[in-house]
Amino acid sequence: MRGQYSLEVQALLELDGGSFMGWWSKGHHNPEEFHRAVVDYEEGVHSVPAVADVKHLWARVLPNRFTDEGGGWLSYCSGPGRGAFPLTELEAR
């Protein structure tokens, strides 16, 4: 799986209200490289937790049917399966 997805940091936002929750990228990336990318992405806006807090998870993107804005939301799952992809995540504190 590693290397299948490019390292593209995105903000992890709460579905209701859009509160900031952390950062994520599709793929299971090297924790140190992901952490460096998050620090570069943030440029001092949010405090970035330690590299030890980086997690490798699995998720699916489900369509957002609650608004007309489109998009989707992450639904975490236990592993590979239909529509699932590897995910690297770092939760804000």
Image: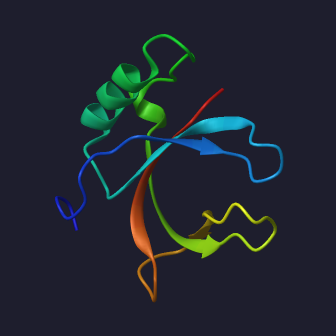
Q: Nearer the viewer, residue 2 or 46?
A: 46
Count all numbered tags in the image, as a single digit. Answer: 0
Specify the farthest residue to the left: 3
Q: Is residue 80 left or right of residue 15?
A: left
> Percent x, y for residue 50?
45, 24
> Percent x, y for residue 69?
70, 60
Q: Quadrant of residue 64?
A: bottom right
Q: Residue at x 44, y 86 (%)?
A: 81
Q: Residue at x 46, y 89 (%)?
A: 82
Q: Quadrant of residue 31?
A: top left
Question: Looking at the image, what colour scheme do you see?
Answer: rainbow
User: Against 13, is 58 above or below?
Assistant: below
> Percent x, y for residue 85?
40, 71
User: Against 54, is 64 above or below?
Assistant: below
Q: Quadrant of the C terminus?
A: top right
Specify the farthest residue to the top: 44
Q: Residue at x 42, y 58 (%)?
A: 87
Q: Quadrant of the N terminus?
A: bottom left
Q: Nearer the viewer, residue 3 or 63?
A: 63
Q: Nearer the viewer, residue 60 or 51?
A: 60
Specify the farthest residue to the front: 68
> Percent x, y for residue 5?
25, 60
Q: Is residue 32 left or right of residue 41?
A: left
Q: Residue at x 41, y 80 (%)?
A: 80
